[in-house]
Image (cartoon, grey):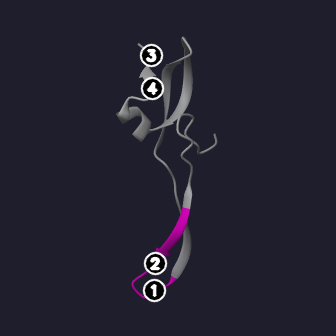
Amino acid sequence: MAKVCDICGKKPLSGHHISHAHNVTKRRFNPNLQRVRAVQAGRVKKIVVCTNCIKSGRITKAP
């Protein structure tokens, strides 16, 4: 499963872990993705959506 939101296209960002001694190592910020049964174009599909899109009402959940 690709770590990309099917609605907004949100994907992982990169950054750094920074310790107290200022040792810097790479890290990855993953979006909070959920598998959801949603209505798309009049049909029920399972899609991968970030929680931001679910909360903002960009999708309609299937009953």
Q: Residues within 10 Å of mark 3 (few under 14, many from 20)?
A: few
Which residue is rendered at x = 44% and y = 16% of the image? Answer: 62
Disc nearest the viewer among 4 and 3: 4
Say which label, 2 or 3, has the lower sequence index: 2
Label 4: which secondary element? loop
3D distance between C-alphas at marks 4 and 3 = 9 Å
Disc nearest the viewer among 4 and 1: 4
Q: How many marks?
A: 4
Which residue is rendered at x = 56% and y = 54% of the image? Answer: 12
On the picture, is 19 further left or further right than 8?
left
3D distance between C-alphas at marks 1 and 3 = 48 Å
Disc nearest the viewer among 4 and 2: 4
Q: Is residue 17 magenta?
A: yes
Q: Which mark, by number, is residue 62?
A: 3
Instruction: Check contact, mark 2 vs mark 1: CB within 8 A.
Output: yes
Label 3: which secondary element? loop
Say which label, 4 or 1, has the lower sequence index: 1
Where's residue 29, x and y in %? 50, 58
Which residue is rendered at x = 48% and y = 73% of the image? Answer: 17
On the picture, is 60 further left or further right than 15?
left
Q: Amino acid at mark 4?
A: Ile
Residue with the mark numbered 2 = 18
Where's residue 52, x and y in %? 40, 40
* 12 vs 6: above or below: below
Q: Is residue 13 magenta?
A: no
3D distance between C-alphas at marks 2 and 1 = 5 Å
Q: Residues within 10 Å of mark 2 (few under 14, many from 20)?
A: few
